[in-house]
Image (cartoon, rainbow, N blue to C red):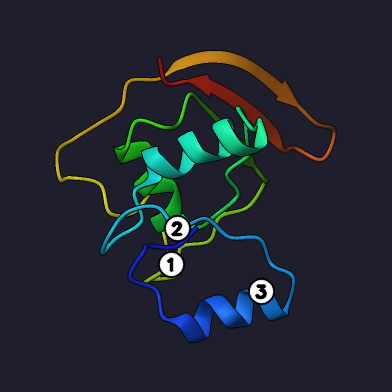
Amino acid sequence: MTSEDVSKEYIDYLNGHNISWIAAGKEHVDLKRAMEVLADEFGIKCLALVGGGKINGSFLKAGLVDEINLLIGPGVDGRIGQPAVFDGLTSGASTPLTLKSVKSYPDGAVWLRYLTK
């Protein structure tokens, strides 16, 4: 996904490497429009978002996340400056979640599934 303001060189690069792309939005990527194009042009109505905190936060802020899956391993990483699962959200804003399921594994990991709507 890219905005419509992307350079011709970048589009040539993508095409030259046989990378599919969608331009949606003028200056910034319009995620809702991009998802409409994926549905209308490619029949894609569901996808797994496995990005970092900024991508996850952008999709959540746009109202495009209906389920959140978290796999928690038996360890703690408290390094300063590490990205969160959801970055870039408005301060004080929260998204209510409903627990869908919990699965625990012999190694101590836990898989949590939440619905956002």
Q: Amino acid at mark 3?
A: Asn
Mark 1 / mark 3, whichever is N-terminal:
3
Residue 69 visible in the shown view: no
Mark 2 / mark 3, whichever is N-terminal:
3
Whether residues under marks 1 and 3 lie with C-beta atoms below 8 angstroms apart, the answer is: no
| Above/below status of 60 relative to 16 | above
Counting from the top left corner in percent of width and height, residue 109 is at 72, 38
Counting from the top left corner in percent of width and height, residue 14 is at 63, 75
Query: Residue at (39%, 57%) from the top-left corner?
Result: 54
Which residue reaches farthest right? Answer: 106
Q: Quadrant of the C terminus?
A: top left
Q: Residues within 10 Å of mark 2 (few under 14, many from 20)?
A: some
Q: Which mark is residue 82?
A: 1
3D distance between C-alphas at marks 1 and 3:
34 Å
Q: Which residue position holds label 3?
A: 15
Q: Which residue position holds label 2?
A: 23
| Above/below status of 62 relative to 79 | above
Counting from the top left corner in percent of width and height, residue 112 is at 60, 27
3D distance between C-alphas at marks 1 and 2:
30 Å
| Above/below status of 75 relative to 18 | above
Mark 1 / mark 2, whichever is N-terminal:
2
